[in-house]
Amino acid sequence: MEKKKRSMNRVNLPATVILVAFALLSLYPIIYLGFYSLKTNDEIFYSNPFGLPLHPQWINYVKAVTTFDVLTYFKNSVLTTAASLAGIFVLVLPFSYAVARMRWKLKGLASMFISIGLFIPLQVSLIPLSVLIKDLGMADTYGALILPYIAFNLAFPFMILSVSFRALPTELEEAAFIDGASVYRTFLSIMVPLVKPAISSAMLFSALGIWNEYILPTVLISSNKLKTLPAGLASFVGQHSTNWGAMGAAMMLASIPTIILYLCFSEKIENSLTIGGAVKG
Amino acid sequence: MNKMLADKKTIFIFTMPCLLFFGLIAFYPVLQTGIKSFYDWDGLTGGTFVGIDNYIKLFQDKLFARSFKNGLLVAGVLVLLQVIVGLFLTLLLLDKRIKCKKFIKTSFFIPVVLSVTAVCQLWSSILNPEIGLINRVLEMLGSSYQQDWLSDKSIAIFVIAFVNAWQYMGYEFVIMYSSANAIPSEYIEASSIDGASRWQTNFRIIIPMMKDTLRTCLIFAVTGGFNIYAQMQLLTQGGPGTATYSLTYMTFRSAFKLRKYGYGCTVAVVLILQCLCALMLINTLLSNKEEEGKRRWRKRSVQ
């Protein structure tokens, strides 16, 4: 036993080395991008391709912002993500509440219907969806992105929220109703605040997905000033491929918000992903 | 109380917007995909019904055969790198004697939160034949072997699969790790007291207990491989030639480049069917094993 304890305290070196090697394989390409966003073309190509930038070229970031419209794309991404999240929760909060706590016959069917959303890949419905968006007069507007983002992100928040609503004690509603509150009032000022943790999990999960979504803006948005980051950046990859440093800077600017979001909420994001994984399987 | 929670008007107000919105924007287009796969449709008019013509054409289309095969190849690579290598890393990280666990886990996951555009741009600079990192490293190591990674017909599809696997490996890793971590430590301790080696414990105790999670990850990897699109668009545009077409890429090209909306829908339907078949196959394969295991166990316990 004594011997065993001692061996438990030691470090398993081979395994640690393998794991750290894989961690670096995941990390180094991003560091490489960060480095070359601060280098001149000459450094990237010839004199210093791997190491730290010796003379940081912050001008690359200025160039990325001034010549590449990064700020416009950034603004569009923030706007569509925020509007989609608002739409998702306006629709899904009352729906989840009604399914989890109210009494009606068709709720099993309704909940199954919304859950189909977990299994529909966007790709599969895209052709008719693009025609529908055109028919609604939404082609090439923010609506072309926001409406589908809302519709395709209802299922997962619904799953998380209905579980949380169900876990609340019924006395809460009883007390509120006795005090003369309406269902609406009870829902808004008592029930919704109590499921805040679930709301934030679902929100992080949906926000990451929407922020990085690539297909819709490339297919449904043609004017450059409405594109979100993933599509906007892709459109100048071909055009400006000569200025690597500035391109790297633009990629960094697009990636930093999600990296920060992840580093701040890593536990929460990982947890919501594992719930999502369990639900989807 | 009961009355208030069963009020029809309130229920209607609470549920209808969500149901209608989902029905119109998400569900209706999927139905349309199925219906329009039997139409000659240009996306502007209603189209004309052509029966199974699109399907006949599709199965004679060489591009379809290639795209289908590419989907299988990518799925294979993703299963290998994300599920098998990921599982191996998960088992390694479970060891209590590993330092800097948090760093390792976070590093694996960071690529997942990046935009696919940034990832593809990053890798296309690393893979660039003249100035890319990989060829430079080969050069420095004194090797004269240089490769134009994305322009070689036979390897481009594997490179694309690798880029996808690199980005999303962390996702499956986190799912597997938290499932393995949730296994009560008594099981593991008990088996080590019984004298099982670490890898015996892994194969006899941990992996069987993770079976549901592994099935989920397997489904993610396989359907993710079939659905691959962004990497094609960003790294190779389906090229060289048509060497890196996938079914999704073919769907979009048929519709938005060639204006054959109906034909594109047909490809999409085959894609759904392919995913469904894989799903059923994985489910039956893994659950059969369980049944067999149970049967064997029952036999043993009877003896």
Image (cartoon, coloured by chain):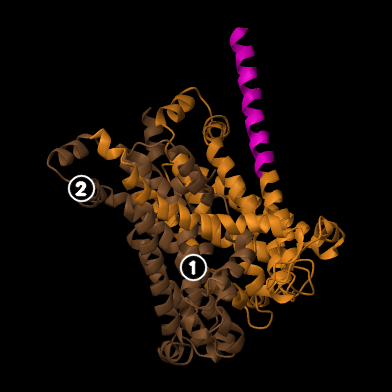
Residue A181 appears in view: yes
- Residue A281 in the image: state x and y as whole percent: 54, 43
Q: Which stretch appears magenta?
A: B279-303
The residue at the point 19 percent across, 39 percent down is A172
Residue B288 colored magenta? yes
Amino acid at circle 2 = Ile
Image vertical order of residue B120 relative to residue A203, above or below: below
Q: Tag 2, which secondary structure?
A: helix
Q: Main secondary structure of the magenta part?
A: helix
> Any idea which chain is the brown one in this picture?
A
In the image shown, does B129 or B160 lie closer to the viewer?
B160
In the image shown, does B297 or A1 lie closer to the viewer?
B297
> Any idea which chain is the orange one in this picture?
B
Q: Which chain carries label 1?
A: A
- Residue A71 in the image: state x and y as whole percent: 41, 84
Amino acid at circle 1 = Asn
In the displayed structure image, the side of residue B30 where residue A91 appears, left or right = left
Same chain? Circles 2 and 1: yes
Mark nearer the N terminus (2 vs 1): 2
Residue B268 appears in view: no
Q: In which quarter of the image is residue B165?
A: bottom right
Tag of residue A212: 1
Q: Nearer the viewer, mark 2 or mark 1?
A: 2
Mark 1 surroundings within 10 Å by alpha-carbon count, few (fewer than 14), some (14 through 19), many (20 or more): many
Q: In which quarter of the image is residue B156?
A: bottom right
Mark 2 surroundings within 10 Å by alpha-carbon count, few (fewer than 14), some (14 through 19), many (20 or more): some
Q: Tag 1, which secondary structure?
A: helix
In the displayed structure image, the side of residue A129 where residue B38 appears, left or right = right
| Residue at far right of view | B60
The residue that label 2 is drawn on is: A190
